[in-house]
Image (cartoon, rainbow, N blue to C red):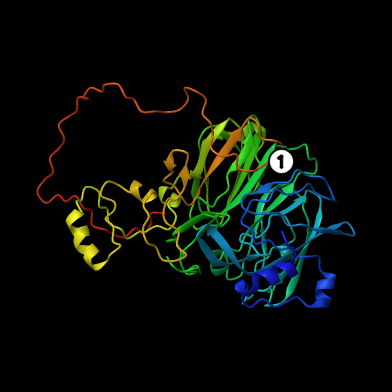
Amino acid sequence: MTNRRTFFKSAGATFLGAAAVSRAGAALLPEAPVSASAATQPPPLPPNGRPFNPIVTLNGWSLPWRMKDGVKEFHLVAEPVVREIAPGMTANLWGYNGSSPGPTIEAVEGDRVRIFVTNKLPEVTTVHWHGVLLPSGMDGVSGLTQPPIGVGKTFMYEFVLQRPGTHMYHPHADEMVQMAMGMMGLFIIHPKDPRQHRVDRDFGFMLNAYDIEPGSATPRVNTMLDFNLWTWNSRAFPGIDPFVARTGDRVRIRVGNLTMTNHPIHMHGPHFEVTGTDGGWVPKSARWPEVTTDVAVGQMRAFEFDALAGDWAIHCHKSHHTMNAMGHDVPTMIGVDQGDLAKKIAKLVPNYMAMGDKGMHDMAEMEMPLPDNTLPMMTGTGPFGPIGMGGMFSVVKVRDDVARGDFRDPGPYRHPAGTLASEYTAEVPEPARATPAKAGPGTSNVRKPGGHAGHH
């Protein structure tokens, strides 16, 4: 983390049209810390105010505050930012305090918070505190509950946090553009009694999506459904950090969805309980077991599990959301011999490669020319080779010897003897099979590409 002055000096031209807060204004406002790092930054324990157990924002950070006359003061700066989606690709986004999503706001039930919002975007904005009980005039809907925050202006929101829970913040001013550009963040209200809802490890992240053409860096903001980059906290696998825990830890994962479609979040290994929504905590008697929980548009979900040793995949179960930059218009070529065609095309396009005749797994290890600043599909690798997933994918890594407060990647899991799937090498008799149906006249092995509208 760095302070704003240092960051502006190092960021140089990455900020577009950012106007400095006046010296007189800055003297009255709390510091607005900046972080452009995409690394997960475990937060320190609260230095003052009511005690709480902080969350770990996946590939993100929590916003520091100052206490003034018993009020917890934060300072958000809405501004253009540059975000690394994954190694090899950066995007021109909008966010807060140097990052997209913005930093996580953490406070405690009963706190009075005062949140200053300075607008350094090229257009007006507001901030809506999603799911937080507050006076109508603090709800952040441009034109309805407040005038918009003009360019270069600072607004002040102030309210008392009445109920603990998992929430988020985002604009309600030109929201299709501003959320398509990455403006959002988590807002966590911890219980007044830190023993309540206590877990050993508490993670949180936002689901967000972008439409960025290969070779470009700025999202297409008028896209309604056809996004091609599906991300967690504006990161795509293998750029998403793992969730690291110790065997036996009680682990909570909080997920918020500000994309334009639902996401069934599936975790391998331990079953979990859905314990919270943006409406509050689910009573223990009403919690339900799952291995997949669907997080609809505009919703938050919190789920908890007891950690079991291993490497457990966690991902969105919509398969095209685990691909990175997708080509929707690519026809199905399974079973099509492209050998002769590839030779002819290669005479005109030297780097042309045939692909997809046996499926798309070869894409996971294929090295092919791409435009600059473009993520290839499914580029993650593990101890056994290409993982074949990207986008909304990560790993829950549980080990016996992880120290409290240690969230570093422990590397690949070492499977105990007899617990690893392996090739069966003894003789395999030919299985009896039914006679396959014959293709009729005119049946083609190639499916004509068509529209994909509505597949989300």
Q: Secondary structure at mark 1?
A: loop
Residue 100 in picture, x, y percent from top left: 61, 61
Q: Is residue 451 visible?
A: yes
Q: Number of labelled discs?
A: 1
Quadrant of the image containing the N terminus: bottom right
User: In this orientation, which residue lies closer to the viewer: 449 or 297?
Assistant: 449
Q: Residue at x 65, y 48 (%)?
A: 279
Task: Write down the residue under mark 1.
Answer: 405
User: In this orientation, which residue lies closer to the viewer: 161 or 366?
Assistant: 366
Q: Residue at x 56, y 39 (%)?
A: 411
- At label 1, which amino acid type do we have? Gly
User: In this orientation, which residue lies closer to the viewer: 232 or 107?
Assistant: 232
Q: Quadrant of residue 302?
A: top right
Residue 167 in picture, x, y percent from top left: 66, 52
Quadrant of the image containing the C terminus: bottom left
Q: Can you say whether 163 is above or below 343 in the image?
A: above
Q: Residue furthest right?
A: 69
Q: Seen in the image, is 252 located left or right of residue 455?
A: right
Q: Residue at x 81, y 69 (%)?
A: 29
Q: Seen in the image, is 403 located left or right of residue 370?
A: right
Q: Residue at x 81, y 52 (%)?
A: 111
Residue 283 in picture, x, y percent from top left: 67, 36
Q: Can you say whether 303 is above or below 186 in the image?
A: above
Q: Can you say whether 300 is above or below 412 in the image?
A: below
Residue 93 in picture, x, y percent from top left: 57, 67
